Image (tube, rainbow, N blue to C red):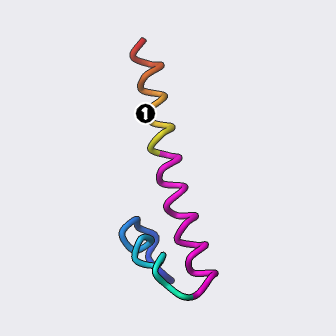
Amino acid sequence: MEKQDLSSAYRRLKSPNIKTRKRALKIIHDYKRARKKTYYTQLTIGN
């Protein structure tokens, strides 16, 4: 099983394999989506 962390995903973006690149993009997008979600929930809780 491959690593699911962010640094490995960025490294896999350089792969010539299309499926590997798509998997890496999904990991990166999920990470960014989760980070945005926590940011916006903190804003709404703070008000």
Bounds of the magenta segment: 17-34
Query: Residue farthest to the left?
Result: 7
The residue shown at (54%, 88%) is: 16
Percent of width and height locating residue 7: 36, 69
Q: Mark 1 points at which residue?
A: 39
Kind of residue at badge 1: Tyr
Residue that appears at 48% across and 54% down: 31
Q: Is residue 38 above or below residue 9?
A: above
Q: Total label count? A: 1
Please state if 8 lies on the left or on the right of 44 as rendered. left
Q: Is the magenta stretch mostly helix, strand or loop?
A: helix
Horizontal arrangement in the rendering, residue 19 relative to residue 40 (left or right): right
Question: In terms of image quadrants, where is residue 23?
Answer: bottom right
Report the front residue among 35 and 22. Answer: 22
Query: Does residue 34 lie above or below 18 as drawn?
Result: above
Tell me, yes or no, whether the highlighted magenta stretch contains residue 31: yes
Asked whether, in this view, residue 11 is left or right of residue 33, the answer is left
Residues packed near mark 1 inside 10 Å, few (<14), some (14 to 19) or many (20 plus): few
The C terminus: image quadrant: top left
Q: In this view, does 35 lie above or below 9?
A: above
Report the residue at 58% width, 87% height from top.
Answer: 17
